[in-house]
Amino acid sequence: MLDVIFLAIVVIVFWQLLTRLETVQGSLAPRKVSPQLTQAISYAERLYHEHKYVAAEKAYVAVLKLDHKNLQAYNRLGIIYSAQKNFSDAIECFEVATRLKPSATTCFNLGLAFYDNRNYIKAIASIKKAIMFEPSIQRYVALAKACDKIADNRGMLEALEKAVELEPNRQTLTLLRDAYAHAGKRDQAAEVAQRLKAAAPGKVMRV
């Protein structure tokens, strides 16, 4: 239905998620660690940033042998497994991360992993939890995409309406206009189309 419209947004959401993880991760490492653990984390991070994901996976597993509650390692492994389309392991890692530190980021990670695994009901639940922690345009758009997958037009429209409330730019208004049109709500679609003419380009589409 709205797959073509959402495809670019979902790609942007993934890259923005990576950027956000980079920002949060540093504060998640243990404050007091052994020299061995510090070295293991540093080595794993270096491999990760060099895009050597197979080696990085093994390195993060080694980190978890030293610190089985290392949130950073679980998040990184979840991202690596998602990139490898190993969604079951990605979900497992993100579930552990969410239990260790429930937050907007960990819940959103889990929601995206559920989405990739086509478990849209659980994806919706996790993304809603992320929004409860911290609403954002990207999370509302991802929620709308998941709702669209289960033909929940009401949920999809409500999510896009919230995105527009947060930032009524050309990207969010275009999504809402097309969603209204798809749902047969011509008057609402026309109203949004008028707003769209005066809307400035937004930041949603920027990587």
Image (spheres, grey):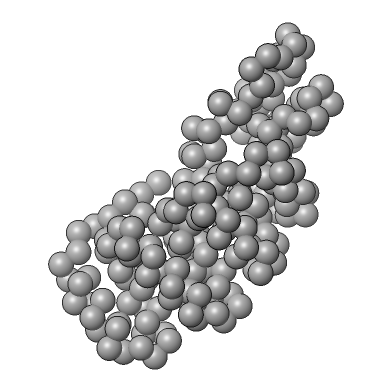
Q: Is residue 36 left or right of residue 165?
A: right
- Extreme-left residue of the structure: 198
Q: Quick check: 41 above or below 109? A: above
Residue 66 in view: yes
| Residue 150 in which image quadrant | bottom right
Residue at 48% from the left image edge and 39% from the top image edge: 19
At which x and y percent is residue 66? 81, 22
Residue at 40% from the left image edge and 78% from the top image edge: 179
Q: Quick check: 132 above or below 151? A: above
Q: Quick check: 179 above or below 72? A: below
At which x and y percent is residue 168? 27, 62
Q: Is residue 31 left or right of residue 203?
A: right
- Extreme-right residue of the structure: 65
Residue 115 in view: no
Residue 195 or residue 30, whichever sits in front: 30
Q: Is residue 112 left or right of residue 206?
A: right
